Image (cartoon, helix red, strand yellow):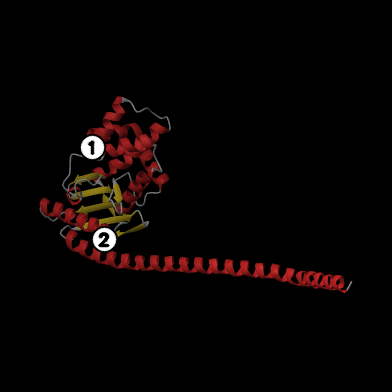
Amino acid sequence: MKIKKRYKLVILLFALGFLILLPHNSLLNNLQEVISKETVLEKNDKNEKATAEAAALAKKLREEKKTQLLATIQTQLVVNEKFGIAIFDINNNESFGIAELEQFHAASVMKTVVATTAFRDIEAGKYSLSKTVEYNLQQMINQSNNNSWEYFNQLQSFDHQQEVSDQLGLTNVKIWGNLMSAKGENELLLKLYKGEILTEEHRKLFFSYMQNTETENRISPAVPSGVNFYHKTGTFQGGVHDAAIVIHPKNPFILTIFTNDTKGSPWETRFTSIQNSARLVYNYFSEI
């Protein structure tokens, strides 16, 4: 009988102990979960902080390199009486340059706006991509044919071209007077590169016209063999220009260089100044 009482007492004490410890186990588990979550959050915060610090350092180094780049470009392009250069870093979404907002007589670089207007009109159903339209697009961009340019001026009107430019938000582009800023051209090329304004079919067709063009003596020599790029040159009186999308294998970029000279600097000297400047830009994107 005494043994049975002892068993009952042991069972009772065990049951009481279990009831007492049960909530504490639950609290302990909850505490462990909270500590675990805090540890994860702390690690995430540390990782985010480290990433932000690395990004800030990389940006600081880019800023230093950009300052050096523009200073060196200045020494190259100064052979021209006047110049403007716009550079867009696609990966880092950064735009910089020298006098990139200043308007220049755009010469045939304006044909990129006219071709964009044509493709948008075609997509809007205003006219079709007939053999005549396609021929004149190819001639206007690839061969810089001024008769084909006039064909589209008559088909579209300057006012309509300006309307398209304004809709796209291009900086300091004035169709009347054929005026354009280097930044305005960069903005157009960026939209084309991103596929924001044309169908893929028309964008590819447009880019095909911007390769192996009638003039390849400005930005082109600065781009290594095997690297794709798409560009449009312009030449008028004292104006010598080039605008390009360069598919750098590491850091694709957009570069527009406008120059003007009325004091008679040799053409080859001016071409070389653009080539050297483009080469400096390409090297910058190889290093960052």
Residue type at tag 2: Glu
Can residue 157 be seen here? The reply is: no
User: In this view, which residue lies farthest toward the top?
Assistant: 131
Asked where in the image residue 102 lies, by quadrant, the reply is: bottom left
Q: Secondary structure at mark 2?
A: helix
For label 1, the residue is: 142
The residue lying at 89 percent from left, 71 percent from top is: 1
User: Number of marks in the image?
Assistant: 2
The percent coordinates of residue 271 (x first, y second) are 15, 51
The residue lying at 42 percent from left, 65 percent from top is: 51
Q: Of 211 and 187, which appears nearest the observer?
A: 211
The percent coordinates of residue 216 (x first, y second) are 17, 44
For label 2, the residue is: 287
Q: Is residue 123 left or right of residue 29?
A: left
Residue type at tag 1: Asn
The residue lying at 86 percent from left, 70 percent from top is: 4
The percent coordinates of residue 44 (x first, y second) are 50, 65
Q: Residues within 10 Å of mark 1 (few under 14, many from 20)?
A: many
